[in-house]
Image (spheres, rainbow, N blue to C red):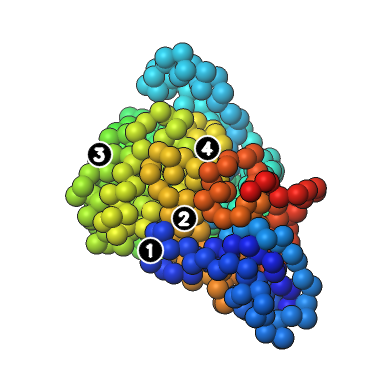
Amino acid sequence: VPILTNIGCLATCASPAGQDDIGVIHDAAVAWRDGIITWVGPADRVPDEHAAGPVWNAGARLVTPGLVDCHTHLAFGGWRAGEFTSRISGASYAEIARRGGGIARTVRDTRALDERALADRAAAFAAGMVELGITAIECKSGYGLDVETELRLLRAYRRVADETRARIVPTFLGAHVVPAEYRDDREAYIGLLVEELLPRVRAEELAEFCDVFVEEGAFTPDEARTILGAARALGLGVKLHVDQLTDGGGAALAAELGATSADHLEHVSPAGIEALASAGVVAVTLPLATLYLDQDPPPARDLIEAGVAVAVATDFNPGTAPSYHLPLALLLACTRQRMTPSEALKGATRFAARALGREASWGAIEPGKAADLAVIDAPDVDQWLYHHRPNACVAVVAAGRVVWRMDRLGPAQPS
Ligand SMILES: [Zn+2]
């Protein structure tokens, strides 16, 4: 029975309600067996049967649940730094797309890579994320946009799950945009998704969720109904990219379709917020994408006040969010979305797990949940997100095993 003790501040996130309720226990300890937490409480009251195993000392630091990044596009070919620079110089997305850039560029670069190469790139990103305290990552396809490459991306994620310490939740995003070769026959592409790709994804059990990008220039609400209706009939969960660049009624659509999460929401309407609240859909906010696109942030305060669970994720992708730094996204959720550090943490743990249908096992530190833990070199959550550092995470436990420790822990930062 391993035990982690001398935890200065343990943020358990044990309560299913309350965006700011992170269930802090001071001077705490956590014990686990076979990767599952067996006991949580004050360090001076550890029961004898939990005091016999290897003991890890947190050095009076903060310990949080392993962070959950519930929205990424982890596997892709190439990068798009040239477009980043063009946009700074004034080029619009439409101009970049006309020159063959944007998603189309990444689709070309992705189709050129085999499964091994895609998995190696994604695994390298996942390893970097684990060092930041992330133990679970949702991973979308969507840069293949043909049968072979979409399946290849999802098979690459299966390799990443087998070959890294991160838990992977794969999502099929064949409906990212309509690929160039179907520009004049959208219906044929939707037919390909519904009649060929989705059944093959299901038969090989390659994805848990199906996602659709609902936006002008991507897919309409009616097209999303067709695609997600077919996905649901095959037993897949439903996610949506909605209301990112315009208010397209996407939040109401997510509620109507019983989606697990509605993601982006920079332009969500008051009616959309009410619909998310009454349907219990998790709102996934993506502050790094908002930052890179220099947009106004989604109305997180209105969402929280309406009773919507607000998650925070990176949206890591080579175009609009080329960073997988989830703690930086949490800082931006504080400063731009006016969420408190506690609210932001809940959004990257318990509520992020809810956005993946995994709240029963991930995202909280309580008996029966997975022993996924991040040791953070800060005395509490407020200090962690306020004093932003390249990496404040000093150790990570995943499925009960210490999978990463900073080489030289050194003394704690001055408090
Ligand atoms: Zn996305």
CB of mark 1 near ligand 1 (< 8 Å): no
Q: How many marks?
A: 4
Mark 3: which secondary structure? loop
Q: Residues within 10 Å of mark 4 (few under 14, many from 20)?
A: many
Separation of residues labelled 4 and 2 (CA atoms): 26 Å
User: Between disc 1 and disc 3, whose residue precedes?
Assistant: 1
Mark 1 → mark 3, Cα distance in angstroms? 27 Å
Mark 3 lies on residue: 247
Amino acid bearing label 4: Asn
Q: Nearer the viewer, residue 235 or 136?
A: 136
Residues at badges 1 and 4 in contact (C-beta under 8 Å)?
Answer: no
Query: Could you classify mark 1 by the number of other residues whose Cα lies within 10 Å: few (under 14), some (14-19), or many (20 or more)?
Result: some
Amino acid of disc 2: Ser
Task: Give the CA separation, mark 2 to mark 1.
Answer: 10 Å
User: Is residue 348 something that shows in the picture?
Assistant: no
The residue identified by callout 2 is 342
Residue 291 placement (x, y as % from top left): 44, 32
Asked if ligand 1 lies within 8 A of label 4, the reply is yes
Q: Are marks 1 and 3 in contact (CB under 8 Å)?
A: no
Q: Is mark 3 within 8 Å of ligand 1?
A: no
Q: Earlier in the sequence, mark 4 or mark 2?
A: 4
Query: Identity of the amino acid at label 1?
Result: Gly
Disc 1/disc 4 C-alpha distance (Å): 30 Å
In this rendering, the label closer to the viewer, 1 or 3: 1
Q: Which mark is residue 18?
A: 1
Looking at marks 2 and 1 on the same chain, the residue that comes earlier in the sequence is marked by: 1
Label 2 secondary element:
helix
- Secondary element type, mark 1: loop
- Displayed quadrant of residue 336: top left
